[in-house]
Image (cartoon, helix red, strand yellow):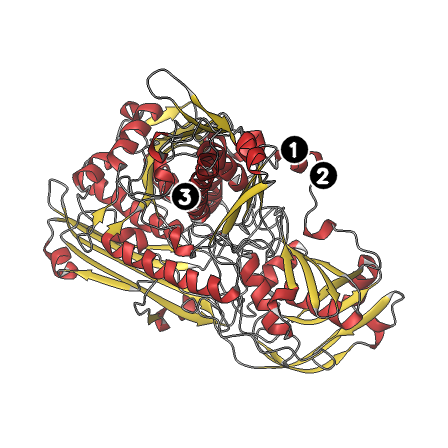
Amino acid sequence: AHGTNGTTAAEGSPVTSPAGERGPARVEGSRRLVGRPVDRVDGVPKTTGAARYSAEHPYPRLAHAVLVHATITRGHLTAIDTAEASAVPGVLTVITHHNAPVLKPPPPVSVMNLSTMASGTSVAYLNTDEVHWNGQPVAVVVAETLHAAQHAARLVRVTYRESPAAVDFAAEEPNATPQKNDMVSEGSAKKGDAEAALAAAPVSVDLRYTTPAHAHNAIEPHATTAVWDGDRLTVHDGAQNVAWMRDHLALRFGVPAAGVRVVAPYVGGAFGGKTVVWAGTILTVMAARVTGRPVRMTLTREGVYRTVGGRTPSAQRVALGARPDGRLTALVHTGVTQIGRVGGGPEQVTSQSRHLYDAGNILLQQSQVALDTVSNTYMRAPGESIGTFALEAAIDELACELGMDPIELRMRNEPERNPIDGKRFSHRMLREAYAMGARRFGWAERTPEPGSMRDGRWLVGMGVASAYHPAWQFAANLTVRLSADGTVLVRCGFHEMGMGGATAQAQIAADALGVPFEAVRVEYGDSDLPTGPGAGGSGQTASVAASLGTACARLRGTMLALARRSKDSPLRGSRRAEVRARDGGLWTSPAGTVAGETYAAILARAGRPHVEVAVGSDTRVGTAVGQARFMAKFLLDRRRWTKAACGAQFCEVRVDPDTGEVRVSRWVGAFDVGTVINAKTAAAQLRGGIVMGIGMALSEETLTDPRTGRIMNPGLAGYHVPVHADIPPIDVCYLDEPDPTMPLGLIGVGEVGITGVAAAVANAVHHATGRRVRDLPITPDKLL
Ligand code: MOS
């Protein structure tokens, strides 16, 4: 229905020049809503409990499914005894590889192939007798009640034949293989001869940093409700990419994608863990297929740890050589990360090291080991989260070697152009971010000597680190409808995991069309909507904004054309350039006189209930072509510009010298994220990233038994995320200067907030105590 005015998705161009002739950068009128701290449109339903999450959809005859997990590292199933489980009253079926329907095999996991990126792993769940990791699902119990299913799941008896396995990252690290460069990921890079420059440098550091695996702990554990109607399937699942999930399920179950609907208007946090499709989703759909009943599965917290990937552990080397004046002559950053033998992908731990320092010689190399563990996956700023820990802690160590202020060292090496290849920055305001942060934090009061600041018995430390995350954009199909009652409906299959994306788009549409915020409704989180971008790479808001700007510009044009058709319209004879969208209509104001009319009046005269504009295609093939074209254009644009969000993280810690307890007592984050669309939700995103980074710095660690590959702390009792009492007030500020190459000048805020945080904490801990902890998390034992 939205094909009439259709154009390719590429029209929401990644390159929106300020001088360009289309796109939201030249939205008429002032920013009335963009930038304001508007409350989230989904805030009230979420806080009052009216919002229905994936496990809260009531269906008649709803059955409940529970997973049975393998308890060996690797091997084969030799027998599964389901008799006792099946005899539990209320159990409908126990599905194993003996009786499971045969699905189409999962496509090989590859980050290079857009159509197969959706596979969390390459395992054909319940269609194989192979066990690839400790925790892989080997059976599903379906019952009338959750309790019956839980009870019966414990009664499934599994026997195995074990095979040799490798699960110990530290032991396997020497076997890592170097990552090659491809179109989207850069495994290595080189400028000059960094090792020689390092050897010749008058001042240098050569350091090893290690970070542990991290588990996804979204407040809403993964949950799925699946309902079949013939070959049509409806799935409620908190996906970060409803289109990928739809396509993956259609492929696996051999049904047309057009009949598969993935619905996720409410998602209780995601952070990358709900981007690809994991076992729970597939097996819930299978259980519904087998039983002919609607089926719900809510993973336990432990179930998330066992079946959903997390962040890789890493071992990194950062070596820096400098002249006595602090100018860097050598920057070496290499890192080993872990992937699963059955899936996952390399982490770009050296990403920020291409961009942050103007070193004369640079050597970057990423390597991987494949282990028999659950596959790794995306987690908030994959690459830069742990990469900035190593790089930014090493810079601090070099500053100490030089006897130089760590901010001064950074400013002396602030590049004019992208260090690794000389590309231009679309804009870069790291200097300004440091200046702003230092002022607000009171950096000048810091005395440089470690251990020199105290508050009673507490040792006080102050540390800084740079934040960095590249800007991403993806294709976004959408429709915008302007109705005779003055309301605007934006429809786009993008995702709202709590970050305020829908609110931001409503603000943008309201400004672009000159209507009140309340007049705009945004529909999202449904694969039946025009295909939007996935919520990933902090690219969603810019992606949707680009297409939304295009659509709104065309709507204004269409409305003006409609008005000009009538001789009664005050806009008759008006040229497009003179017309402004405001007060619910189009108005010209030549020399004191005001002429114009409301959209309602224009539509009423034209006898039209509404006008709708579509950007992108409404067909699968058209969408795929549009996405490919958009990505090609985006990658081309990347060769021209280096564009990113960056920032300066300022941390103050208090360390108890007797117990080694570290308390973060103050935080200032100053960011360059381009235009801020919503001052409240952007700050919340940045703050949330900082909280997650504090967890990474001080407490978070997935512990795997090196003998069995079993995760030993699969829950919040053993895996410590920060609680409210651990977090000080966090002062977030931003420069709010538009990036001239991004839609509306905005750069995503979802991920940059976590980057640099762990380094700022580690640097502050060193300042407080004189102790360098290069192995995260910085637990009290490491300070004693
Ligand atoms: Mo993110 S790790 O791009 O959800």
Q: Is residue 662 visible?
A: no
| Quarter of the image with the C terminus in it | top left
**Depth check, front residue: 105 or 549:** 549
Q: Identify residue type, mark 1.
A: Val
| Label whose residue precedes the other's in the sequence (1 or 2) | 1
| Label whose residue precedes the other's in the sequence (3 or 1) | 1
**Do residues under tags 1 and 2 come within 8 Å of each other at their CB atoms?**
yes
Disc ID at residue 44: 1
Q: Identify residue type, mark 2.
A: Ala
How crowded pointer 2 is (Cα within 10 Å; few <14, some 14-19, many 20+) is rated as: few
**Do residues under tags 2 and 3 come within 8 Å of each other at their CB atoms?**
no
Residue 135: image x %, image y %?
A: 62, 67
Question: To which quarter of the image does residue 84 belong?
Answer: bottom right
In this rendering, the answer to whether 89 lies above or below 648 is: below
| Quarter of the image with the N terminus in it | bottom right
Disc ID at residue 550: none
Q: Residue at x 29, y 22 (%)?
A: 445
**Do residues under tags 3 and 1 come within 8 Å of each other at their CB atoms?**
no
